[in-house]
Image: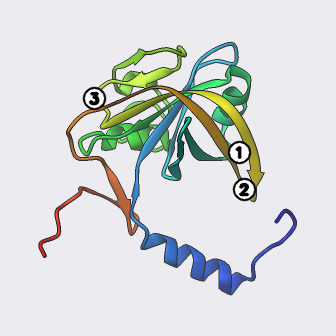
Amino acid sequence: MTGTFATADVRAEFVAGMRNAATGVTVVATDGPAGRFAQTVSAMCSVSADPPTLVVCVNRRSPALAALATNAVFSVNVLAAEQIHVADTFAGRPSDGEPYDFGCASWTTLTTGAPVLVGAAATFDCRLVDAVDSGTHQLVLGAVEKASQRPVDPLIYHAREYRRCQPVSA
């Protein structure tokens, strides 16, 4: 749909509707010849379990995107509810410290060498499979080489606020 633009009304309706979509908050991180970069991303989902593949949507203005392409490895870290400071740091708006500063949390590496966030609700260590341009973003597909999870509440983003999961009573 390159070159197709929505009217101002449709765009406003879309943005308003997306505020009502609850999403998990993730940090996509990479390291390698192009350097170490990370970016907070709310658009991430499973593509396939056979083989394990996921997709993240990264704004094309993000310096992390060029590094992802060159490094060809990345991690997707599903933030735990207590990791709001990590989300804000890699969204470029830390409450203290510098934006995009890896010193805001502890990191390790797994199979690919990409930075993996210690204490995340889930982590996915990936090799770049493909990238597709779509509007202002690039859809980055990753083959998952290692995954882990912890039994903690993930950080949720809804109506422009961070939230926690809560069970719904029937």
Q: Nearer the viewer, mark 1 or mark 2?
A: 2
Q: Earlier in the sequence, mark 3 or mark 1?
A: 1
Q: Is residue 140 above or below residue 20?
A: above
133 to the left or right of 73: right
Q: State the mark number for residue 119.
A: 3
Bin the neighbour count of mark 2 within 10 Å (Cα to Cα): few under 14, some 14-19, many 20 and up. few
Q: Residue 103 in the image: x percent, y percent? A: 39, 21
Q: Is residue 161 above or below residue 143?
A: below
Q: Earlier in the sequence, mark 3 or mark 2?
A: 3
Quarter of the image that includes the N terminus: bottom right
Residue at figure coordinates x 58%, y 18% from the top left = 31
Q: Is residue 68 above or below residue 138?
A: above
Pointers 3 and 2 in contact (CB under 8 A)?
no
Bin the neighbour count of mark 3 within 10 Å (Cα to Cα): few under 14, some 14-19, many 20 and up. some
Q: Residue 98 in the image: x percent, y percent? A: 46, 31
Which residue carries the number 2 mark? 136
Q: State the mark number for residue 86.
A: none
Amino acid at dot 2: Thr
Q: Nearer the viewer, residue 94 or 79?
A: 79
Amino acid at dot 1: Arg
Pointers 1 and 2 in contact (CB under 8 A)?
yes
Q: Is residue 40 above or below residue 21?
A: above
71 to the left or right of 39: right
Which residue carries the number 1 mark? 61
Residue at figure coordinates x 67%, y 34% from the top left = 63
Task: Name the image quarter holding residue 97.
Answer: top left
